[in-house]
Amino acid sequence: MPALPVTGNLAQRAAMASVLVASLLLVLKLLAVSRTGSAAMLGSLADTGLDLVASLVTLLGVRVAATPADHNHRFGHGKAEALAALFQVALIAVAAVAIGWRSAHHFTGQHVVASADYGIGVSVIAIVFSIGLIAYQRHVVMRTGSLAIGTDSLHYQSDLVLNLSVIAALALEQYAGIRGADPLFGVAIALWLAWGAWTSANTAIDHLMDREWPLEERDRFLAIAAQHPELKGIHDLRTRSSGTQRFVQFHVWVDPAMSVFEAHRVMDEVEARLERDFPGVEILIHPDPEGHVDPSAPPVAIST
């Protein structure tokens, strides 16, 4: 893994590139909406505005995530990303309602799309910039493993489909003469934004509520930990995520006759083995004499 200052700088540069691209596209699409009056382009403009907010939040999140734990935040500052995500969800929901309402209004009115070539040109420019940004983000994710940049990259990948839909709407409306195509695509974009808000809200709430890791990942973690020959069993596994930080704690059964020094050595070896497959995860292991079970603990016990 690269040194922490290098990964932090690369992640922040990727976040800054995302902010710059979103700012440029926001200006271009604002001009395109004023020229075309397209509901689909309006939806694309709203999505780009949300992209800018998301990119700014990603930049802030990368910086906050690099802030060390302090006296008042012993587990770090990862929850700030989930709170910021909920703020984004509120913006996305409002934009989806507004775009859906305007698109529905265009169905009943005498809405005419103008200057479709201008709107198509802006959408093509947006696609080119998005492809370049995604390529750079992938490079940074490969170097740093940043979850924040990886998530931002997924968002811009979905923008490629969105911009293609805008091109289709404008071409069908003005060149193919299919009336109603533009507001229809506008409604589809509004629904797509609403679905994105719903899924983002669920993810943010899962982080705030300390949802467990996926079952497959927990099973893989346990399988690696159980490989140590001096462990008699593993129980009371608990996992959670906080922004880009992840935490695991669990109890292990060891020989009751084992000294504290020997038990500490075993815990260090188990932790070192796990860190190779789960880098950056904060691990807390509690040794118990073989067979001991805390009656107040949740019924999650896996024996080796």
Image (cartoon, grey):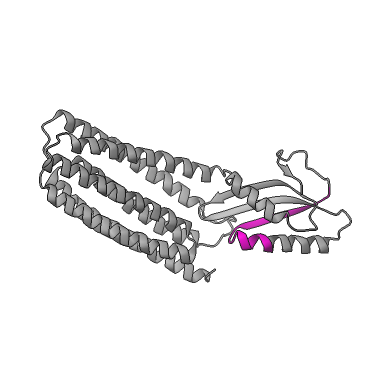
**Magenta span includes 26:** no
The answer to which quarter of the image holds residue 127 is: bottom left
User: What's drawn in magenta, residue-wise?
Assistant: 272-290
Quadrant for the N terminus, please. Answer: bottom right
Residue 289 within the segment the image draws in magenta: yes
Count of numbered tags: 0
Q: Residue at x 37, y 64 (%)?
A: 136
Residue that lies at the very extreme toward the top in this rendered image: 108
Question: Taking 302 as reference, is 246 above or below it?
Answer: below
Residue 232 shows up from this direction: yes
Q: Could you say where residue 260 lies in the image, as x and y percent from the top left?
A: 83, 60
Left/right of residue 10 with respect to residue 105 in the rendered view? right
Which quarter of the picture shows residue 278? bottom right
Give the residue at x 14% y 42%: 37
The residue that appears at 52% across and 42% down in the rendered structure is: 206
Residue 170: percent from left, percent from top:
17, 44
The x, y position of residue 98, in whole percent, is: 26, 36
Residue 280 in the image, given as x and y percentages of width and height: 58, 61
Q: Is residue 49 visible?
A: no
Q: Nearer the viewer, residue 187 or 67?
A: 187
Q: Residue at x 74, y 53 (%)?
A: 286
Q: Is 282 displayed left or right of 87 in the figure?
A: right
- Left or right, residue 253 beside residue 172: right
Residue farthest along the right direction in this orientation: 257
Q: Residue furthest front?
A: 176
Camera-side residue of 174 and 4: 174
